[in-house]
Image (cartoon, rainbow, N blue to C red):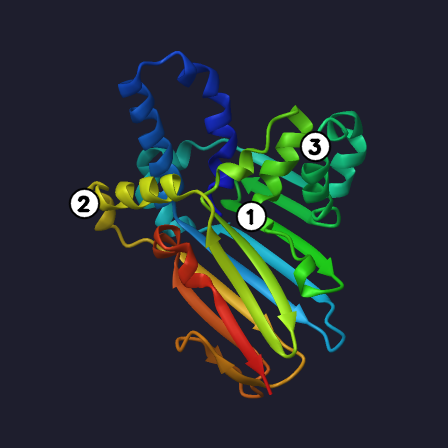
């Protein structure tokens, strides 16, 4: 999720990390996790499904400035960053086709699932706006990509890296059959998952005491009325065709499967 904001920083330091002893490596990893896991971020995932099963998905990652100031302290006013970038994933496949063709067939097919994903990145320390937006049109819900890995895969193709996104400890999949919509989240790396939970358990109490805005919100719109939702905390619209479900981002990172969802339509 908001790890993407810090992704380049850790890659820039990989060569340094490789030369360090185990204790130095652990300090580096903990510093990165602090930025990743307690940085203030709001994530909103919006899906709209049409009557024919097609639709759109948009995922927005937004740095929440009031909360971020608590973490950055004096460094907040010293930021000097500007980036305004828009790209479509298939442009990377085309531009770096020689690299793309070096990947195994299964990896190429994975990349192709992201072909029409559009990414918009805005980072402005002057305007204090740090936002990343992912958009994808789909013909069927099962075509939806795990959007939060898009930037990792783009970096892989550009730099001829191995599939770094596969180091994530969970994946998100979607399907919609016979009036039943499912958002399926599963753990793919139990060791990294346990490491994340352990880190949270041992996090410095001073960070736990901060009042940070770290929300993860699902906003889903369906072609018919909702009959039932697996999560009782979901709020339905007056016409029962939409729902909103909000989580704490830190809780989701410790238990990604809690964001799995089943929605049954009438």
Q: Which residue is mark 3?
A: 104
Label 3 crowd bin: few (<14), some (14–19), many (20+), radius 10 Å: few
Residue occupying image coordinates x 78% and y 38%: 91
Q: From the viewer's side, name the closer residue of 219 and 122.
A: 219
Mark 2 or 1, which is nearer the eye?
1
* Residue 25 pos. (x, y %): 33, 21
Q: Is residue 224 left or right of residue 19?
A: right
Tell which tag, 3 or 1, sits nearer the viewer. 3
User: Cα distance, mark 3 to mark 1?
Assistant: 22 Å
Q: Pinpoint residue 192: horizontal percent, then vertical percent.
A: 38, 39
**Residue, disc 1:** 148
Q: Which quadrant of the figure has residue 216?
A: bottom left
Q: Is residue 21 above or below residue 254?
A: above
Query: Residue drawn at (65%, 24%), measured in percent from left and top?
Result: 159
How many residues crowd mark 1 within 10 Å: few (<14), some (14–19), many (20+)?
Answer: many
Disc 3 to disc 2, how far (Cα)?
45 Å
Residue appearing at x 70%, y 47% in the figure: 114
Would you say 177 lies left or right of 262 here? Answer: right
> Which residue is denoted by mark 2 in the rendering?
205
Residue 64 is marked as none
Badges 3 and 2: C-beta atoms under 8 Å apart? no
Residue 186: percent from left, percent from top: 47, 54
- Marks counted in the figure total 3
Query: Most extreme residue toward the front, as rendered?
Result: 105
Above or below 129: residue 72: above
Name of the residue lying farthest toward the top: 19
Residue contact between numbered discs 3 and 1, judged by CB atoms under 8 Å: no
Question: Is the C terminus in the top left, top right, bottom left or bottom right quadrant?
Answer: bottom right
- Quarter assignment of residue 227: bottom right
Q: Secondary structure at mark 2?
A: helix
Image location (x, y in percent) of residue 55 = 71, 67
């Amino acid at each position: 999720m908001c790890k993407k904001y810090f992704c380049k920083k850790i890659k820039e330091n990989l060569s340094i990390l490789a030369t360090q002893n185990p204790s130095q490596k652990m300090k580096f990893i903990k510093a990165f996790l602090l930025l990743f896991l307690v940085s203030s971020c709001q994530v909103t995932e919006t899906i709209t499904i049409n009557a024919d099963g097609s639709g759109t998905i948009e995922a927005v990652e937004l740095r929440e400035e009031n909360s971020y100031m608590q973490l950055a302290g004096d460094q907040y006013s010293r930021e000097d960053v500007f980036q305004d970038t828009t790209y479509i994933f298939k442009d990377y496949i085309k531009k770096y086709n020689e690299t793309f063709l070096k990947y195994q067939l299964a990896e190429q097919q994975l990349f192709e699932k992201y072909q029409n994903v559009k990414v918009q990145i805005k980072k402005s320390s002057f305007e204090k706006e740090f936002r990343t937006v992912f958009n994808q049109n789909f013909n069927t819900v099962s075509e939806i990509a795990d959007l939060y890995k898009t930037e990792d895969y783009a970096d892989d193709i550009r730099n001829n890296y191995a599939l770094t996104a596969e180091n994530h400890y969970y994946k998100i999949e979607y399907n919609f059959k016979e009036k039943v919509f499912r958002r399926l989240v599963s753990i793919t790396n139990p060791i990294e998952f346990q490491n994340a939970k352990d880190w949270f358990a041992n996090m410095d109490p001073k960070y736990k005491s901060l009042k940070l805005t770290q929300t993860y919100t699902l906003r889903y719109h369906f072609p018919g009325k909702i009959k039932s939702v697996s999560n009782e905390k979901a709020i339905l619209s007056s016409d029962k065709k939409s729902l909103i479900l909000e989580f704490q981002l830190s809780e989701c990172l410790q238990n990604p499967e809690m964001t799995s969802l089943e929605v049954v339509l009438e």
